[in-house]
């Protein structure tokens, strides 16, 4: 599965201190990472590279949407211009550790993608899709029909007391309080935007 700079940054940030520079694309376009060998000046489009800053060329040929994870300082500005992104580790680390952490991030999303395909192929069970996706988003989800009946919702909603307000009413419909709350929020946001 392809990822984007935001997902990679968040995944690395869970266990490493790092800074992000550049303007990332939000589409899922980035291929699995590779180690930069220092031989070429060309950096392929939609690629992720792990490199020591001292290896990076001063005038690289960046083909667009390149993400470089740098160890050992700040790289030349070209690496975080346009749609290129640079993640700089603010703590000492070795190339293998960083590369393996990146692989684990990709593995996590690949497993999720494969599980979703399996669920869809076997049963198409929306409840299973939502429950499996909670492990990725860490946010409860609700699928509601146009008639305000619950079609499916994250199992965690019925398990956690702090999420009780998201539970369906006794007729399996969206609680009226939740509808009022969402309408009030929408009206407040509309007034703020004006």
Image (tube, rainbow, N blue to C red):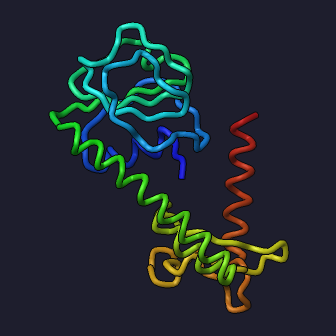
Q: Is residue 40 left or right of residue 100?
A: right
Name the spot of residue 139 as percent of width and height, x first. 51, 64
Q: Residue at x 64, y 71 (%)?
A: 142
Q: Is residue 103 left or right of residue 111?
A: left
- The answer to whether residue 2 is above or below residue 79 is below
Q: Where the C terminus falls, by quadrant?
A: top right
- The answer to whether residue 105 is above or below residue 85 is below
Name the spot of residue 119 as percent of width and height, x first. 61, 77
Q: Is residue 143 left or right of residue 100?
A: right
Q: Residue at x 58, y 33 (%)?
A: 25
Number of numbered tags placed on the structure image: 0
Q: Nearer the viewer, residue 5 or 141?
A: 5
Name the spot of residue 16 as percent of width and height, x first. 25, 43
Q: Residue at x 42, y 60 (%)?
A: 108
- The answer to whether residue 65 is above or below residue 55 is below
Q: Which residue sits furthest bottom? A: 170
Q: Which residue sits furthest front? A: 39
- Residue 93: name its quadrant: top left
Q: Which residue sits furthest top? A: 59
Q: Residue at x 50, y 18 (%)?
A: 62
Q: Which residue sits furthest left? A: 92
- Residue 39: name its quadrant: top left
- The answer to whether residue 60 is above or below residue 149 is above
- Residue 124: name its quadrant: bottom right
Q: Nearer the viewer, residue 38 or 6?
A: 38
Name the spot of residue 130 as percent of width and height, x first. 59, 73
């Amino acid at each position: 599965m392809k990822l984007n700079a935001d997902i990679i940054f968040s995944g690395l940030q869970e266990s490493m201190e790092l800074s992000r520079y550049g303007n990332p694309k939000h589409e899922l376009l980035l291929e699995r990472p590779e180690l930069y060998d220092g031989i070429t000046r060309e950096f392929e489009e939609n690629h992720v590279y792990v490199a020591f800053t001292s290896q990076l060329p001063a005038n690289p040929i960046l083909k667009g949407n390149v993400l470089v994870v740098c160890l050992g300082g700040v790289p030349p500005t070209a690496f975080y211009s346009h749609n290129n992104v640079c993640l700089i580790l603010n703590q000492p680390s070795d190339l293998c550790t960083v590369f393996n952490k990146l692989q684990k991030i990709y593995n996590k999303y690949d497993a999720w993608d494969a599980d979703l395909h399996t669920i869809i192929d076997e049963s198409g069970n929306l409840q299973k899709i939502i429950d499996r996706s909670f492990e990725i988003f860490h946010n409860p989800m609700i699928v509601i029909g146009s008639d305000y009946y619950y079609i499916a919702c994250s199992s965690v909603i019925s398990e956690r007391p702090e999420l009780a307000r998201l539970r369906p009413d006794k007729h399996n419909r969206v609680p009226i309080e939740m509808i009022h709350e969402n309408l009030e929020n929408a009206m407040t946001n509309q007034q703020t935007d004006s």
